[in-house]
Amino acid sequence: MLYYARGSKTDIITERDTWTALREVFDSMGPRRRVLAIPPDYTRLNSYAGPITGMINDYFGSCLTDVMPALGTHSPMTDEQIASMYDGVQPGKIRVHDWRNDVVTVGTVPAEYVNEVSEGRVSYTWPAQVNKLLLDPTFDLILSIGQVVPHEVIGMANYTKNIFVGVGGAEGINKSHFLGASYGMERIMGRAKTPVRDVLEYARTHFIPKLPIVYILTVRAKDEATGELVTRGLFIGDDFECFEKASALSLETNFIMVDKEIQKCVVYLDPAEFKSTWLGNKAIYRTRMALADGAELLVLAPALKEFGEDPEIDRLIRKYGYKGTPHTLEATAANEDLQNNLSASAHLIHGSSEGRFKITYCPGPGMAREEIESVGFAWGDLDEILRRYPTDRMRDGWNTMPDGEEVYYISNPALGLWAYPDRFKD
């Protein structure tokens, strides 16, 4: 059922509009005894899910008993991040998702189905795993909150991904990531219906149809007039229609087609959001379809301090590096540690240029040149690059530097997907 749908490429949905929409939807549902909210974590700070979680807290009060950030395999949020993102939510309501130990397998997607939707690329079973808290029968409403935006693993982020990956288990997360990587990012990004989404929809309809989950989905973009992030769309519902409408608007809003291939791309990683290549490599896979052969991608990462958000994934990245699909698949076939962590294998594929363009990472003091180069990236001096490309004086899109060099600048790779039409495979 679709409870609410509003949005367009030019719409601006204000805080008051959002609160009014939520109140009308919740009023229509009738009283609830116990509510669980599942917002994204701090890595999705720009999603507007934080303020929405605060509004949910204001509406339901003590009936909102639990708020579980959808960490996936990310590091748990700090107290400061929780207070900043979920302003007004009592700390005692916050629950930490343990993706290794607190999950229950609610069903298994058959290997035959996975093989069919992946066109033969993957043929394993897929465990549908969720945090055990979701199965508590005393919850009569579960609110899954998040932003729909192009995504490298599943095509479009959020909806059931927030459930089966955001608060899912290690095996399900690993296998879903590897399924997407095996099928191919260029065939997935920007699409609502993909093999990974098909598998998650199978799990939703077969294994958790009775869970009282309602999805609250935003579409966000920068307003050209003000440069501020605004909400372009708000969609609330309990089935695929809600996600499909949000995806259609996100594709229109967040998918940027460039008029020519990019030879030099400068991407800035906000220190508040990007501290690892696990997250920061959005700079790579969100731009790869816009980059020319032989192009250079400069990733400015002042807060970079690690490769993986999880210690084991960090170790695997350091061990195997970003060396392309053939090398990663061979390493996975030959090494048990990668076989046991397929999301790391998928990430190594996502973070490689496949030798097609040069990736230069420019970290701050948190990571040494030797570390950057050891995983297969080129290293750049951040201060020197910032002097040449002063991001505070550059605008998103094409810029012509004083010496005549033309560069394409992206201030936040999490907000979109960039492509040159000839490289976007339909």
Image (spheres, rainbow, N blue to C red):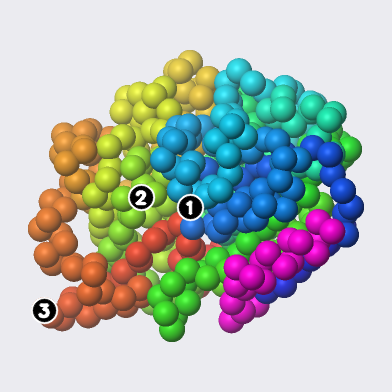
Look at 88% across and 59% down and name the residue there.
28
Name the residue tied to disc 3: 403
State the separation of the CA atoms marked 1 and 2.
Answer: 9 Å
CB within 8 Å, label 1 to label 2? yes
| Residue placed most toward the observer, 143 or 403 | 143
**Residue 235's x, y, as percent?**
72, 63
Q: Is residue 346 above or below residue 254?
A: above
Callout 1, which amino acid? Leu
Residue 345, numbered circle: none
Q: Is residue 306 left or right of residue 43?
A: left
When asked about the image quadrant of residue 21, the answer is: bottom right
Membership of 21 in magenta stretch = yes
Q: Is residue 224 left or right of residue 323?
A: right
CB within 8 Å, label 3 to label 2? no
- Would residue 224 be seen by someone viewing this image from the given angle? yes
| Residue placed most toward the observer, 78 or 287 | 78
Name the residue tied to disc 2: 272
**Residue 225's x, y, as percent?**
43, 83
Look at 24% across and 49% down and name the residue there.
302
Name the residue tied to disc 1: 45
Look at 48% across and 16% down and name the residue there.
336
Membership of 71 in magenta stretch = no
Q: Quadrant of the C terminus?
A: bottom right
Q: Which element type, helix, strand or loop, lies under badge 3? A: loop
State the separation of the CA atoms marked 1 and 3.
Answer: 36 Å
**Residue 150's x, y, as percent?**
56, 58
Callout 3, which amino acid? Asp
Sequence-wise, the earlier of marks 1 and 2 is 1
Q: Quadrant of the N terminus?
A: bottom right
* Magenta stretch: helix, strand or loop mostly: helix
Q: Which element type, helix, strand or loop, lies under badge 2? A: loop
